[in-house]
Each structure stands twice: as C-alpha cells, then as structure tokens.
Image: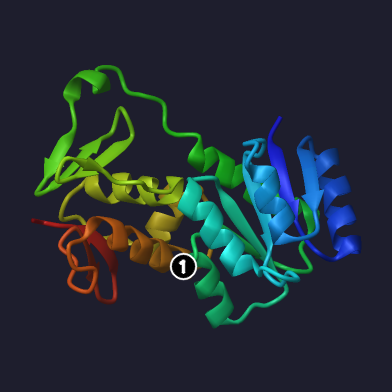
Amino acid sequence: MPRVLLIEDDQAVREGLQIALTYQGHTVEAVETGEEGLARLTGGTADVVVLDLMLPGMDGFEVCRRIRASGDLPIIMLTARNDDIDVVAGLEAGADDYVVKPAQARVLEARIRAVLRRTGGEPRQAGAAEAGPERHGDLAIDRAGLVVAKHGRPVALAPTELRLLLELSASPGRVLSRQQLLESVWDQGYLGDSRLVDACVQRLRSKIEDDPGAPAYVQTVRGFGYRFGPL
C-alpha cells in the first residue's frame, strides 16, 4: 500500500485529500508545515511526497530542495499557482511532477500512481546483469544495476532523471521529441507538460555534463527535442 506524506497548510484541503487518497488505498500521513514534513521523513516512512508550494515558514521550494538533496524520494508539487515561473522553479527544485489546485483527488491519485510506476524501475532483462555497464565517454551506465558513474564515481540521480538518461542513451544519436519522452519516461499516454522534460534535462545536465551550457551527452535539437550524443 503506497505511503503518501502530504504537506499542506490549508486544513480543509489537507483533510479532504487525506480522506480521498486513503479511500483510494493509500496510507496518508498529513502535516501542516515543511518543517514537520522534513522531520517525518527522517523515519523513511513515505513512498512519495505531495508538497504544497505556499507553506508558512519554509516554503515548498526549499522543502523540495532539501528532500532532493537527501535522496530520490518522488515529489509531486501541489500548487495554487499555474504561471510558468512557479512551475519551472518547482521542477528545477527537483519535483517530479506538479498538480495545480484545486486538485481533483482522482487526478492527484493518477499522478501518484504514475510517479510510483516510474520510480519502481524496469524489470531486468535476461542476461542484462552479465552485459556490464555501457561506456559513453567518461560516463558509465549500468542498466541492470541502475547505476550511473562519471570518472568512476557514482552520480546520484533522481528516478525520473535516471529514466530519462536510460531512454535517451538507449539509442545514441537518435532524436526524441518532448512528447515521446513524456510518454516513455513519465507515463505511457500521459498528457503532460513539455516543461517537465526541459526541467528534468536541465537537472540531468547539471549532474553529468562537464559544461551544462555546452552539453556533450544530452543535446538539444532545436525544434525537435533531445538526443544523446553522439560523442
């Protein structure tokens, strides 16, 4: 049963979502502030965090950054705002997805299920473990072990960042559109926002590129999308 940590300061929204998500089969722990949420996470009792943006005290952006800095726990940003700056800022802070309030419980439930499917990893292919890591320049990608290393040192990637890298690097030189990446990395048939892709690419570049401003691994093909290499 998925465990959800809901961080939401509005009591009516908090209680409504807690009831609705519990009815959908989740175990929901609901807190009012970011500080409370971070304290609850020290026990490692959540599978996904649903995080309000506008919180008293520590805001959702900072909470998101702190969660992401300490691990790869999936984060869905819950916000009353829908302008580009807030959405992009939230995604760049490390959120895996976002839902604009007033959020319908069934929409939030679908997003939670989707992000948990994405972070659950792909089934291993027979023989994959013997294949060993792929090497692309200074980057080593172990598809079986889901480990990425650069210059021999592990690179900590959030689940969505890892899935994006695995998808792009599976066919070096092939251009994939944002919609193709949304469907393959985020969720099949998912009607998402292409900004999810762009923000995730930026985060990925900051971790694997020598110069994120002149990327060698994840390259932009203007007007089409992204490709991995060629190196």
Residue located at (50% from left, 42% from top):
118
Residue located at (25% from left, 76% from top):
222
Residue 130 or residue 40, whichever sits in front: 40
Secondary structure of the residue carrying tag 1 is: helix
Residue 72 or residue 214, whichever sits in front: 72
Identify the amino acid type marked 1: Glu
Could you tell me residue 102's position as x and y percent? 79, 68
Residue located at (48% from left, 45% from top):
71
Tell me if I can see residue 191 in this picture: no
**Taking 82 as reference, is 212 above or below it?**
above
Residue located at (68% from left, 48% from top):
39
| Residue on which disc 1 sits | 92
Could you tell me residue 178's position as x and y percent? 38, 64
The C terminus is located in which quarter? bottom left
The N terminus is located in which quarter? top right
Could you tell me residue 143's position as x and y percent? 28, 33
How many badges with numbers are in the image? 1
Could you tell me residue 33's position as x and y percent? 75, 61
Residue 119 or residue 212, whichever sits in front: 212
Tell me if I can see residue 182 in this picture: yes
Residue 89 or residue 151, whichever sits in front: 151
Color style of the picture? rainbow
**Taking 8 as reference, is 57 above or below it?**
below
Give the class, few, some or many, for how many residues have Cα within 10 Å of label 1's Cα (few <14, many ≥20): many
- Quadrant hosting residue 10: bottom right
Q: Is residue 116 left or right of residue 39?
A: left
